Amino acid sequence: MRRHLTPLRVVGGIVAVALCALLILFLLPSSEYLLLPDVAHPVAPLVQVQDAHPAKDGSLYFVDVVERRATELERLFPWIHPHGTLEPAGAIIPPCSTAAQADAAQFEAMRVSQQIAAAVALRRLGYHVDVRPSGVVVSQLFEGTNAPCKLQPMDVIVSLDGKRTPTVASLHSALDGVKPGSVVDLRIRRGNTLLPLKLRTVSEAAEPGHAFIGIGVDQAAHIKLPVHVSIDASGIGGPSAGLAFALEVMQKLGRNVLHGHRVAATGEMQLDGSVAPIGGVKQKTYGVREAGADVFLVPAGENAKTARRYAGPVKIIPVHTFNQALRALATLPRTSPRA
């Protein structure tokens, strides 16, 4: 018996094909990553300090970003996640690295940020903190240079052409006599292993004639704290919680830095007390709004501009340094104690 095509069967077939296509797009991973807001995390339960006598006025949060590979459906229809941002895979996983290596670098960055945060806070409280520069840590790899695929994030450069490079300034000094295009001999520490590496320099766009390795750098250091500080980041990686951790260390040692406010903070702490910019500000700002925070401390510059765009009722406070963050919190209007 022959079946005749009816309009209803045609529509049903079209719908079935469309649903199959959507299912495939939903299951098929794309070449891009999706950044989504995460909940703001209370800092107090994560930070333990020897001889703590916490100030209990106010609450402090740090914020993270949910990061995962986008599906083809999410790539084609980004409006599905109005608070999300699509990023190319190369912006999340460095060239020639695996996802596991990228994760390991992020966890190491978190570990280092915790040490630096504790050191900055304890110094501000008048403690003597023993800090010995130990090299220059690779924080970023620039496309169009020869650094990607040779260096990895969190590699520590300990010498260049036989000259020790314990500080960022010493690395720049060692590069002063190098002509762009020359090959330099680097000695790097990757984990617990020392490795020799040859790398061809390029000309720096901002300073023609100046040799450029192709990396962004931070200071690596051996830090000995005068009191024991333990921070459990609960499996979260990256250095962006440094400012929040430093504030909480002070709070744990009796210094009321929050003054009754619900405070969220983000920013990478540097050993000199400066606050460096971070990524995922849009998503972090939405996370702060969900937490009901009063204020959000954010690195000054583009980070703060982005945060203001999505802040809603949250007060954005841009900061360049840890001391500036403390002053800004101290000058906020006092609040009534919260139940």
Image (cartoon, rainbow, N blue to C red):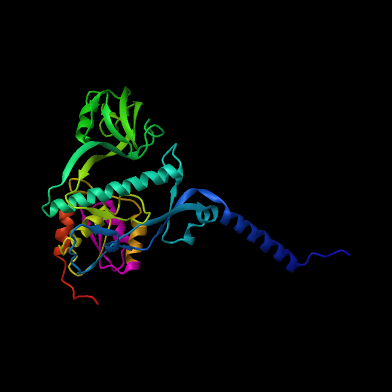
Q: Residue 17, how many percent across, how many down?
A: 67, 59
| 301 part of magenta stretch | yes
Decide if residue 318 is in sight here: yes
Q: Residue 140, how many percent across, how many down?
A: 33, 40
| 154 part of magenta stretch | no
Q: Nearer the viewer, residue 61 or 19?
A: 61
| Residue 10 placement: quadrant | bottom right
Q: Identify the residue at image location x=32%, y=64%.
A: 288
Q: Residue 238, how many percent across, how many down?
A: 34, 49
Q: Residue 285, how many percent across, how many down?
A: 33, 61
Residue 225 against residue 45 in the figure, above or below = above
What's drawn in magenta, residue-wise?
290-319
Residue 38 against residue 334 in the figure, above or below = above
Residue 213 against residue 278 in the figure, above or below = above
Give the number of callouts: 0
Give the position of the N terminus as an image quadrant.
Answer: bottom right
Residue 204 against residue 308 in the figure, above or below = above
Give the position of the C terminus as an image quadrant.
Answer: bottom left
